[in-house]
Image (cartoon, rainbow, N blue to C red):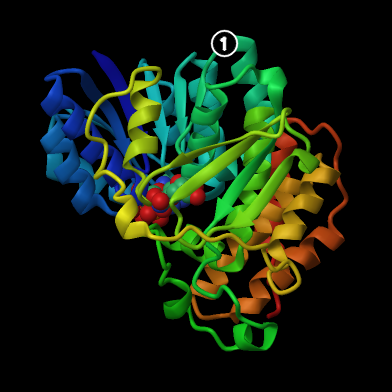
Amino acid sequence: MKKIGIIGSTGSIGTQTVEVVRALNRQNPGSFQVVCLSCGSNIDLLVRQALELDVRSLCVSSAADASELSKRLGRGYNVLSGEEGLCELASMEMDILVTAVVGMSGIMPTLCAIRKGTAIALANKETLVAAGEIVMREAGLRGVPVLPVDSEHSAVFQCLRAIDRNALKSIVLTCSGGPFRGFTREMLETVTAGEALSHPTWNMGGKITIDSATLMNKGLEVIEAARLYGLTADRIEVVVHPQSIIHSMIRTCDGGIIAQMGIPSMKLPIQYALTYPARLPDAEPQLDFAKVRELTFEEPDTEVFEALPLAYEALRIGGTMPACLNAANEKAVRLFLEGKIGFTAVTEIVREEMEKHSVIGDPAIEEIIAVSREVYSRAGAGR
Ligand SMILES: NC(=O)c1ccc[n+]([C@@H]2O[C@H](COP(=O)([O-])OP(=O)(O)OC[C@H]3O[C@@H](n4cnc5c(N)ncnc54)[C@H](OP(=O)(O)O)[C@@H]3O)[C@@H](O)[C@H]2O)c1
């Protein structure tokens, strides 16, 4: 039996992880036991998940929600709150922690779990963007696996299993192009949050959906890939592939290309991270090639979607610059979703913060957290 924790269990990845665990337990009863769950504030769903899966250790963001949760569940539950609570939860004895929280709130719990020797099924890309060098170094020192859940990185991970690592030339991350593919800058000026939240191929949480619309999501994934696979920026390509059937590819030194394909669904990447190295049946419906008909590719428009080159720049500069980019973006996306700024201001705010930032080279985790908080609190002020 594998003991698993899910932080961010009420979100898009979190609820799909619960579905995957249910399906795996149907195939092999008792193969997975969920030992802890967390959410921000959706305690109605957290209660249902805790009761269904008989999970006794829980965490929510606020102390007020924690006391409401304790009241509803009664005795026999360990209910924690806040960042410290999430770190305590992540430090529990378990085999694998699924990091399905959104944003920089994932950094410290991920590190806590690694320090305990727990394998990570990593959905929370912001952790690797802001603190990837430290996280991967600590995981490497302890021999802790960091298994990608992001579909592109899972695809690369699966492709890499087919070759000797020395034969890798570069990786090619695919990108749907988001809902505004083909738009001009002028057209982007007037798009609404509702339009930006309508992703053509993926159904995801709010922040990542906006990141997909600005192409910052692909930028974050470039940095995530650099950290996961120890690659420099020049060995990570991005290609727009609107059908989202090829999840990503690798180029080999002899000119070959290996791709991983499937329907656009997170079930397989989640399941593979949980069962790795085993492959089990029925993660998702099979791809029907006759229905797909065509696979197309184009270059990303980096003049209109400036977030992608900004992310490459942050990766090349290194130090605390990726943390700055990440925090500025997180704040700007929040301001956009709250209706306080327009769509194009999201990337402008990231650029402004990067221009202001004094980079700390080889930062400690405390410096990364401090930079992230400072940039987050300042970004977009006065708009
Ligand atoms: N969705 C996808 O298909 C997908 C694909 C690849 C990678 N990812 C990555 O996976 C992560 C999660 O994405 P998602 O789409 O699942 O997000 P989501 O639907 O917004 O869910 C986020 C989860 O985190 C919780 N949460 C929010 N703010 C929190 C805070 N300050 N402290 C603690 N918990 C907090 C939420 O709780 P409440 O429900 O109470 O708000 C929810 O459980 C992101 O890093 C994203 O980039 C997602």
- The residue tagged 1 is 143
- 257 above or below 115? below
Residue 310 position in % (x across, y down): 76, 58
Number of residue marks: 1
The amino acid at mark 1 is Gly
**Observer-nearest residue: 221 or 285?**
285
- 18 above or below 211? above
Tell me if residue 124 can be seen. Answer: yes
Q: Does dot 1 land on a helix, a strand or a loop?
A: loop
Residue 68 position in % (x across, y down): 22, 49
In the image, is 68 to the left or to the right of 4? left
In the image, is 273 to the left or to the right of 72? right
**Observer-nearest residue: 68 or 146?**
146
Residue 86 position in % (x across, y down): 43, 35
Quadrant placement of the N terminus = top left
Quadrant placement of the C terminus = bottom right
Residue drawn at x 57%, y 51% as measured from the top left:
174
Residue drawn at x 63%, y 63% as measured from the top left:
298
10 Å crowding of disc 1: few (<14), some (14-19), many (20+): some
Residue 246 position in % (x across, y down): 48, 48
Picture quadrant where residue 195 is located: bottom left
In the image, is 333 to the left or to the right of 200? right
In the image, is 30 to the left or to the right of 309? left
Residue drawn at x 57%, y 11% as measured from the top left:
143
- 71 above or below 186? above
Tell me if residue 71 can be seen. Answer: no
